Amino acid sequence: MKSEQLVKQFFEEVRSGRHPERAAKYMAETVQAHQVISENTQTVVRTPQDYTDHVHEMIEAYGDFSVELQECIATDEKVYVRWKQIGTHIGIVDGYEPTGLPVIEIASAVYRIQNEKIVEYWIQIDRAGIETQLKQNKVLD
């Protein structure tokens, strides 16, 4: 399977929240996740089960959210993806009580594929945008 096709299927099945338990189908036993948080890079080692748990946490926070791939660019072993996720604030997020209002996440990542599995990725999420929405929703609630 081509790298681009693998990442798209990963988003459709796992990252979307439809079938998070299928993470092992797309991810190596351990994956290095490089996360950019306000100019600081943090590397976390994730297993497919860790990722499944992470998606379940998103579902608890945002309900049945939608994910729209807005851009996908691939080379042989790396795939860049930018997406828009829309959910409803139904669980506690960063200390903010649920409001029942929409929250939009804009994010991008580069996934490195080896032996038809995701082995590493670099992710950037517009966390300031999410924080702004949570603050505004608190006022509207």
Image (cartoon, rainbow, N blue to C red):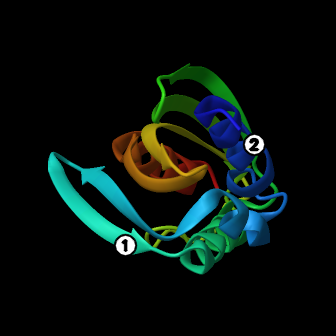
Q: Is 100 situated left or right of 117 in this image?
A: right
Q: Position of residue 6 (x, y in %)?
A: 68, 41
At label 2, the amino acid type is Gln
Query: Circle 2 is placed at which residue position?
Result: 9
Determine crowd level at label 2: few under 14, some 14-19, many 20+ residues with C-alpha closer than 10 A: some
**Number of labelled discs?**
2
Determine crowd level at label 1: few under 14, some 14-19, many 20+ residues with C-alpha closer than 10 A: few
Quadrant position of the C terminus in the picture? bottom right
Image point 15% across, 45% down: which residue? 39
Q: Is residue 28 visible?
A: yes
Image point 72% across, 62% down: which residue? 25
- Asked whether disc 2 touches disc 1, contact meaning CB atoms under 8 Å apart, the reply is no
Q: Is 76 situated left or right of 9 in this image?
A: left
How far apart marks 2 and 1 lie (CA) works out to 22 Å
User: Of the residues under marks 2 and 1, which one precedes in the sequence?
Assistant: 2
Provide the secondary structure element on which disc 1 rests: strand
Q: Is residue 91 visible?
A: no
**Closer to the camera in the image, 72 or 26:** 26
Provide the secondary structure element on which disc 2 rests: helix
Q: Position of residue 93 (x, y in %)?
A: 52, 68
Check residue 45 in the rendering and tell me which mark sits there, or answer none: 1
Q: Is 95 situated left or right of 84 in this image?
A: left
Q: On screen, 49 above or below 135?
A: below
Image point 69% across, 72% down: which residue? 56
Check residue 67 in the rendering and tell me which mark sits there, or answer none: none
Q: Position of residue 46 (x, y in %)?
A: 45, 72
At label 1, the amino acid type is Val
Q: On screen, 131 above or below 54?
A: above
Among the 4 quarters of the image, the one containing residue 54: bottom right
Q: Is 114 situated left or right of 89 in this image?
A: left
Q: Position of residue 10 (x, y in %)?
A: 70, 48
Quadrant position of the N terminus in the picture? top right
